Image (tube, grey):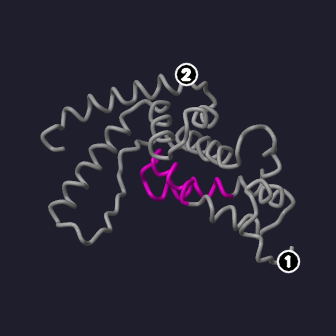
Amino acid sequence: MKASKALPDRTDEDLMDAIAKGDHESFQILAQRYMKLLYSVAFRLFPQKPDAEDIVQEALLRIWSKAHLWKPGTGAAVSTWLYRLTYNICIDHKRRSKQSMTALDENITDGRRRADKKLQDKQTGALVAKALQGLPERQRAAFVLCHYQGLSNQEAATVTGTSVKAIEALLVRARQALRAELQKHKGVL
């Protein structure tokens, strides 16, 4: 396919159709659009940078090889399909590795804040990340998708393969558990 100036303006659906036909340029555009979001999902579920990068790499490979499986007109947006794909890879990765997800690779880059504020923010972030990692897998996934990724309950239900009511229940339990865990560290926060 010859390069076109209009190519970056194409819809996700058009790009998926072109990717299914082997269009490398469309794949690059879609990958650029969603790379940060896919990494964010992977990192929230696997807060170790190498693991998150591996998951995104695998997601990109699957997008390329399985683009033909995405079907327009089913009601699911391309972004929802990509979230679901990444989420499934995270679950597969967890099953394969059986490793603890307690590490936090957080980089605070705002040089204008004072050092004590940076330290406090890092400690708070570490406590929140640790509390988040202590949640059961389904609660953590629901919380990450809805609160960190900004998905609606319906979209999160589609990604996780559950009902909206199940997502709502998982979110309630996740919030309660996080609140209880963070109350233990009230003096630090």
Residue at 40% x, 29% y is: 174
Q: Quadrant of residue 116?
A: bottom left
Q: Where residue 16 sits: x, y (%)? A: 78, 55
Secondary element under disc 1, as helix, strand or loop, is loop
The amino acid type, in three-letter code, at marker 1 is Lys
Which secondary structure type mostly characterizes the magenta part of the structure?
helix
Residue 26 in the figure: left or right of residue 89: right
Q: Where residue 161 sits: x, y (%)? A: 64, 30
In-front residue for pair 78/125: 78
Tell me the crowding category of disc 1: few under 14, some 14 to 19, or many 20 or more residues within 10 angstroms, Cα based.
few
Q: Could you tell which of marks 2 and 1 lies nearer the N-terminus?
A: 1
Q: Which residue is mark 2?
A: 165
Q: Quadrant of residue 128?
A: top left
In-front residue for pair 143/48: 143
Residue 39 in the figure: left or right of residue 32: left
Tell me the crowding category of disc 2: few under 14, some 14 to 19, or many 20 or more residues within 10 angstroms, Cα based.
few
Please tell me whether residue 45 belongs to the stretch shown in magenta: yes
